[in-house]
Structure formats: structure tokens, C-alpha cells
């Protein structure tokens, strides 16, 4: 029987459809390592347990609890059952999940079931003399606030891509099998499943380390290709403003902002984007912001680390050429 440290932090890891650890895993375990001892929970097909536990160790999980995936057609409830079982066993100081669609769903379900406090969309975690706290960027990035619990361990969803800390590799994490008693709570079931075929080889927008985004300033869907060209040279994901989406340059899935995807990359390049508050709400926590806009008074320059006042169709081709030349 594995003993868990009193400062254990339970980290709920997700897997990709291909059965690998989700890209959010390194950041979640890194965040956990700054406040305690990371204990990973993995719910996956049994054949993947060893490989996934080793991968979690690489990202710093001191212990790994592995649960059986069970019926794949039941949504959320089996995962909440597994988190509840792990919580009983580990008695953690906090529970960390990704602020992904699944992570949010599981976090809400688990916090409600156990009447625990829930802190969502954290951009950092920390601790003070009273326990674990979560940091948030709110009102479009205008304020940074901290949330703390007055009762019980915090359940925290962490924005993807925002955590830079990485935990030290654990060569041989303690791996134990988690036995889960199904709660019998009614679950939504998936009746049919059709995989969407994405032809893009670019990184996914949510959680990407680098993003190049385009706005209305690109002028048309054809000309938006310039954004994609720069993204490809940088190995970045492609994003867009709502005006660019509304004008039909790219699909809604590309929209960054208050009513789109909220991102926290290391690098965010904004091309022909004015920097409206609703756009900034989705990208203001990016580490380095580069903006190209022909209007020197565009609000995006107020938050940009590097700004170029100029026409994107003059500046960006030169940037692409320079980057290509540098790559050799
Ligand atoms: C409830 C609500 C929710 C919203 N949610 C979102 C959201 O999630 N995401 C979002 O993005 N917006 C959102 N919006 C819309 C937001 O208010 C802005 O309208 C939108 O972000 C503007 O997009 P834009 O910067 O591309 O366009 P514009 O504001 O029109 O700016 C275009 C910019 O391109 C520059 N430009 C033009 N031509 C060139 C050129 N050749 N070279 C260089 N620069 C050039 C211009 O100087 C200008 O600054 C929301 C609005 C509301 C009311």
C-alpha cells in the first residue's frame, strides 16, 4: 500500500484519442510540483497503463494511480468516480485538472459531488500559510486575482499552456492500481461517434506554445494565407479575431477571445488585429506579444512587447523571408 505525502497534490491527467498523455500534462505536473508532491491519476485502457505511468514520471509524477477506462461510451461520471476514489486514497492538499472541455466537466462534477470549492481557469497556483491558492487573470486580463478556499482542498482547473514550470523527472514513480466503485450516477452516453478528420499538421490552438493570429486587417480569406505562412515558418498554431471569423476568413474554431478560445502561449503574434478588450481577454496572458498594425494608436500596442507600425503585407513577407534565411 503506497503512502501519500501530506502535501500530495492530485493531478488528473488526460489522454489523447491516440492514447498518449495530453499536452497539458507537463504543465499540470509542473504546477503541482510548486505546491507539493504531484500524484497523477490516469484513467486509461489497461494496455496503456505502463507506458502512460512512465510518461507521467518523466513529467514529475512521484506516484501514479491508474484506473481502468471502463465503458468508453459514458461521459464524465466514470471519470468523476475515479477522481472521487483517488481523492479518498490520497487526501490531497488540492486537485488539479486541465481547463479543457473534459477537465472542466470532471472538475465541476467532482467538486459538486464532494461539496469542495472550485477555482476555474487558473493561470497559476501557489500556497500561503493557509493552504493552496489559485491565481486568475480576469476582466479581460485587466486584473489578477487570487482565490483561496475556506473549507476543504481546492479543485482547480488550469488554463492550458500557461504554466512554464516543469517538475523534475521521476525515474520510477510508484504505480498503484486504483479500484473504483461505480457510483451508479446517471451519465450521458455517446450513441455514435464520428472522428472529424483534420488535415492540418499545425499545433492545436488551445495549449499551443506559439500562435500567429490574424484580424480584419488581412482583408479577405485568400489574403489570410499570409497568417498561415508565418505560422508555418514558426511552427505555430493559427488564431483569429472575431471580426476575421465573422467575415468568413477562417472558421469559428480559430477565434481567440472572450467568446472564443482563451490562450496563454509563449509567443502571440497579432497581425491586423486592433486589440479590442474582448480579443485581449483571450490572449493577454501570453508571455511575449508581437503586433503588426498600420495604425500606431491601435490598442494592441498597449499590451505588445514588440510592435511594428506598418502594413502586414509589407512587413510579414519580409519577416517570413528573414526567418527562412535564419533557418538556412
Ligand atoms: C460580447 C462580445 C464578445 C466578443 N468576443 C470576441 C472574441 O472572443 N474575440 C475577438 O477577437 N473579438 C470579440 N469581439 C469583437 C471585438 O469587440 C472586436 O470587434 C474584434 O476583436 C475586432 O477584430 P479585429 O481587431 O480583427 O478588427 P478591427 O477592430 O476592425 O481591427 C482591424 C485592425 O487591422 C488594422 N489594419 C487594417 N489593415 C491593415 C494592414 N494592411 N496592415 C496592418 N494593419 C492593418 C487596423 O488598423 C485595425 O487596427 C466581441 C465583441 C462583443 C460585443
Image (cartoon, rainbow, N blue to C red):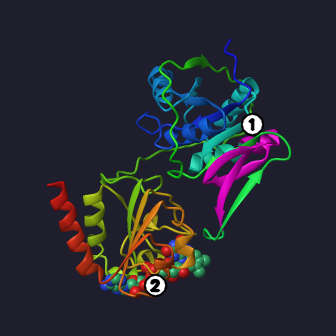
Looking at the image, can residue 243 be seen? no
Q: Which residue has dot 2 on it?
A: 298
Q: Main secondary structure of the magenta part?
A: strand
> Picture coordinates of residue 130 (x, y %)?
81, 42
Residue 20 image position (x, y, % from top left): 43, 34
Q: Is residue 314 rendered magenta in the image? A: no
Residue 120 visible? The answer is yes
Quadrant in which residue 73 is drawn: top right
Region of the chain picked out in magenta, as a range: 110-138
Left or right: 326, with 101 as reference point: left
Along the line of sight, the residue nearer the viewer: 210 or 191: 210
Report if residue 115 lies within the magenta region: yes
Task: For mark 1, give the secondary structure.
Answer: loop
Q: Nearer the viewer, mark 1 or mark 2?
A: 2
Residue 32, position as x, y percentages in the image: 61, 38
Q: Quick check: is the Cβ at mark 2 less than 8 Å away from ligand 1?
A: yes
Q: In the image, is residue 239 above or below residue 276?
A: above
Where is 179 relative to 192, above or below?
Answer: above
Distance, label 1 to label 2, CA atoms, is 52 Å
Horizontally, residue 71 falls left or right of residue 304, namely: right
**Mark 2, other Cα within 10 Å: few <14 / some 14–19 / many ≥20:** some
In x, y percent, where is residue 274? 45, 81
| Residue at 47% across, 40% down | 22
Q: Earlier in the sequence, mark 1 or mark 2?
A: 1
Q: Quadrant of the N terminus?
A: top right
Residue tagged by mark 1?
A: 185
Residue at (72, 56) in percent of width and height:
146
Amino acid at each position: 500500500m503506497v503512502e501519500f505525502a501530506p502535501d500530495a497534490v492530485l493531478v488528473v491527467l488526460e489522454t489523447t484519442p491516440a492514447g498518449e498523455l495530453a499536452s497539458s500534462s507537463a504543465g499540470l505536473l509542473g504546477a503541482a510540483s510548486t505546491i507539493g508532491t504531484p500524484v497523477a491519476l490516469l484513467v486509461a485502457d489497461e494496455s496503456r497503463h505502463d507506458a502512460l505511468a512512465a510518461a507521467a514520471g518523466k513529467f514529475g509524477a512521484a506516484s501514479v494511480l491508474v484506473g481502468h477506462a471502463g465503458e468508453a461510451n459514458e461521459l464524465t461520471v466514470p471519470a468523476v468516480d475515479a477522481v472521487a476514489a483517488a481523492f479518498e486514497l490520497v487526501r490531497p492538499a488540492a486537485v488539479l485538472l486541465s481547463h479543457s472541455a473534459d477537465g472542466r466537466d470532471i472538475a465541476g462534477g467532482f467538486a459538486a459531488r464532494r461539496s469542495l470549492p472550485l477555482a476555474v481557469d487558473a493561470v497559476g497556483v501557489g500556497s500561503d500559510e493557509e493552504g493552496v491558492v489559485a491565481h486568475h487573470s480576469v476582466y479581460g486580463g485587466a486584473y489578477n486575482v487570487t482565490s483561496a478556499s475556506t473549507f476543504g482542498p481546492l479543485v482547480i482547473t488550469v488554463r492550458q499552456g500557461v504554466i512554464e514550470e516543469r517538475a523534475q523527472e521521476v525515474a520510477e514513480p510508484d504505480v498503484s492500481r486504483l479500484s473504483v466503485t461505480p457510483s451508479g450516477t446517471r451519465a450521458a452516453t455517446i450513441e455514435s461517434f464520428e472522428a472529424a478528420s483534420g488535415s492540418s499538421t499545425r499545433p492545436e490552438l488551445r495549449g499551443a506554445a506559439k500562435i500567429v493570429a490574424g484580424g480584419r486587417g488581412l482583408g479577405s480569406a485568400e489574403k489570410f494565407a499570409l497568417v498561415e505562412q508565418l505560422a508555418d515558418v514558426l511552427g505555430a498554431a493559427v488564431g483569429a479575431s472575431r471580426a476575421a471569423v465573422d467575415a468568413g476568413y477562417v472558421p469559428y474554431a480559430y477565434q481567440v477571445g472572450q467568446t472564443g478560445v482563451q490562450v496563454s502561449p509563449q509567443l502571440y503574434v497579432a497581425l491586423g488585429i486592433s486589440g479590442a478588450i474582448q480579443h485581449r481577454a483571450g490572449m493577454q496572458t501570453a508571455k511575449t506579444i508581437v503586433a503588426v498594425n498600420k495604425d500606431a494608436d491601435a490598442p494592441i500596442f498597449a499590451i505588445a512587447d514588440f510592435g511594428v507600425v506598418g502594413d502586414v503585407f509589407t512587413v510579414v513577407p519580409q519577416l517570413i523571408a528573414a526567418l527562412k534565411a535564419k533557418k538556412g
